[in-house]
């Protein structure tokens, strides 16, 4: 008895931290009255949750150590989902026995994407109509490991149909059917829909139908009846998620969870599920833009640098294979306004041209605002300080707004120079010459540093018709492209003088 007492812990509803005793205020996140009693599953209970194995999951190996040389890499086969942009984010497809979390704000398109994924998986490649494969844009820039693909159908020809169980815990089966008809996804006999919130019954259905892939939409609505905590609480979330992940590891079924992210941008109970699953992808941006960016933030089976691009249409999400000038506004003969600078951001195997926009406006002295979206606000604060100190630009009495057009997020320091030039251009009300773009990282001394994969960025800019690049000084190492004028700069002040 004494042993089981030590297993009682208290979990914070807001940040997911674990504490040995109850406290009125969570010491980690500062939320009041958020701790909730939680009985962590004992190792025995966990072992019991692992059903007799028939799958490829790693937990099914019985804990026997193997020599590294004896482990077969082919042990992690991937199943392409049939939606190339989703596969790109996952690193090539769904790994059997793995758990994937798809997060995003309500209404962003999680259910839409996963229903499309479920349909494509269930359809397999054999039943695809070949005429659909030529629809739309096929100019995917060569990405290693990905088959050249079409608009919505982009699948390796050998793909066999998978049995998919789509568990809808928020909508009724009828609502899901309505959505499926809208998406044109009703014809697959191997796609099973289950409207259920009780995790035990879900597990029973998984044992009964033995699907290859299970989608749980959403994990926040699932509950375990023998837990005293309310459905939706952190305890429920963690236990239900763990039970399904153990089942996945033991049986080889791949589980895809949908998780809602709150307005603050965190998943409700974020730390709790993020560390349990193998792969975490998030929908970025907001639902007011037609374009959706799906970004991988954790991946045990691949790179986390890739993003998937989609467009929300009347018939669901459509892949955007070649983003081209998608995120760059086409300004008319007047050219672009001041405060707008184009830059090239590397996102995995692809270069995205994005437009950084800035605006400065005089503010109440001592209360200058800095509002940033799409780039890191810490980075912008640093860039403003560099502009003040190294380029003698007075911004202390100005509000500064920085935005990346189209709702994309760029996290690379290679966009520093573009951000600095956008702020300077807005401040001086001096637009850049049309067809100009800038890449470079800024140092605290006001120096412009080189960036990785400059040639790739220049090629993409040249392909999309930009003729003038402002780049870090590289001398003889600078890649030369025909038709593009390169302007090398060593310092930020130099870039601003020549602007
Ligand atoms: P949904 O997938 O339900 O969002 P989530 O599961 O992330 O909460 O997407 C809902 C939005 O997408 C809704 O506002 C309607 C829109 N939508 C379309 O524009 N076209 C479509 O074909 C579908 C199914 C939804
Ligand atoms: Mg939904």
Image (cartoon, helix red, strand yellow):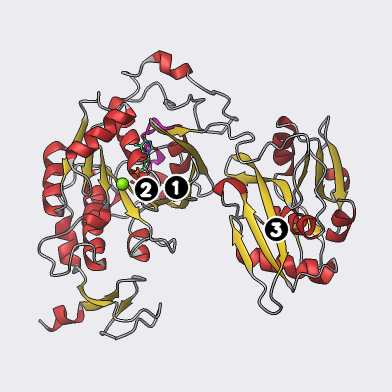
Closer-to-camera residue (302/332): 332
Report which residue position mark 2 lands on. 107
Residue at figure coordinates x 63%, y 55% from the top left: 403
Using the image, tell me which numbered label, if any, was put on residue 359. 3
Using the image, tell me which numbered label, if any, was put on residue 400. none
Q: For marks 1 and 3, give the CA distance.
A: 24 Å
Q: Is mark 1 within 8 Å of ligand 1?
A: yes
Range covered by the magenta-colored residues: 72-83
Q: Earlier in the sequence, mark 1 or mark 3?
A: 1
Q: For marks 3 and 2, give the CA distance.
A: 30 Å
Image-based side of 28 in relation to 345, left or right: left
Crowding at dot 3, Cα within 10 Å, few <14 / some 14-19 / many 20+, comes out as: many
Residue at figure coordinates x 67%, y 57% from the top left: 413
- Which one is in front in this view, the residue at disc 3 or the one at disc 2? 3
Using the image, tell me which numbered label, if any, was put on residue 287. 1
Q: For marks 1 and 2, give the CA distance.
A: 7 Å
């Amino acid at each position: 008895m004494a042993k089981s007492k030590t297993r009682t812990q208290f979990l914070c509803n807001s940040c997911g931290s674990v504490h040995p005793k109850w406290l009125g205020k969570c010491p980690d996140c500062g939320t009041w009255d958020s701790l909730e009693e939680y009985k962590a599953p004992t190792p025995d209970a966990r072992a019991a949750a692992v059903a007799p194995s028939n799958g490829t999951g790693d937990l099914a190996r019985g804990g026997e150590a193997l020599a590294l040389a004896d482990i077969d890499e082919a042990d992690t086969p991937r199943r392409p989902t049939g939606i190339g942009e989703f596969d790109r984010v996952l690193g090539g497809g769904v790994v059997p026995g793995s758990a994937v979390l798809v997060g995003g704000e309500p209404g962003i398109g999680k259910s839409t994407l996963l229903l499309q994924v479920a349909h494509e998986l269930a359809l397999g490649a054999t039943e695809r109509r070949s005429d659909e494969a030529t629809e739309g844009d096929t100019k995917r820039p060569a990405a290693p490991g990905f088959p050249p693909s079409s608009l919505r159908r982009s699948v390796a020809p050998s793909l066999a149909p998978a049995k998919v169980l789509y568990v809808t815990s928020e909508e009724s089966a009828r609502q899901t059917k309505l959505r499926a008809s809208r998406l044109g996804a009703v014809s697959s006999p191997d796609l099973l829909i289950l409207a259920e919130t009780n995790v035990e019954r879900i597990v029973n259905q998984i044992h009964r139908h033995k699907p290859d892939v299970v989608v749980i939409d959403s994990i926040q609505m699932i509950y375990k009846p023998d837990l005293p905590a309310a459905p939706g609480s952190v305890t429920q979330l963690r236990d239900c998620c763990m039970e399904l992940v153990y089942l996945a590891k033991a049986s080889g079924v791949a589980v895809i969870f949908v998780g809602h992210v709150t307005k603050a941008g965190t998943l409700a109970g974020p730390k709790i599920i993020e560390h349990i699953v193998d792969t975490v992808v998030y929908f970025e941006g907001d639902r007011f833009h037609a374009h959706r960016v799906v970004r991988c933030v954790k991946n045990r089976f691949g790179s986390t640098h890739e993003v998937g691009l989609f467009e929300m249409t009347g018939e669901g999400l459509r892949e955007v294979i070649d983003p081209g000038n998608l995120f760059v506004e086409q300004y008319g003969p007047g050219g672009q306004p001041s405060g707008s600078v184009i830059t090239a951001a590397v996102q995995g195997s692809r270069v995205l041209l994005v437009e950084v926009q800035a605006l400065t406006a005089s503010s109440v002295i001592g209360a200058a605002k800095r509002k940033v979206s799409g780039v890191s606000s810490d980075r912008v604060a640093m860039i403003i300080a560099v502009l003040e100190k190294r380029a003698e630009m007075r911004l202390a009495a100005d509000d500064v707004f920085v935005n990346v057009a189209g709702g994309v997020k760029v996290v690379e320091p290679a966009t520093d120079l573009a951000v600095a030039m956008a702020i300077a251009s807005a401040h001086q009300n001096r637009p850049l010459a049309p067809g100009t773009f800038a890449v470079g990282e800024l140092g605290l001394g006001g120096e412009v540093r080189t960036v990785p994969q400059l040639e790739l960025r220049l090629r993409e800019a040249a392909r999309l018709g930009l003729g003038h690049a402002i780049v870090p000084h590289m001398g003889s190492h600078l890649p030369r492209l025909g038709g593009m004028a390169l302007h090398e700069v060593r310092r930020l002040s130099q870039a601003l003088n020549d602007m």
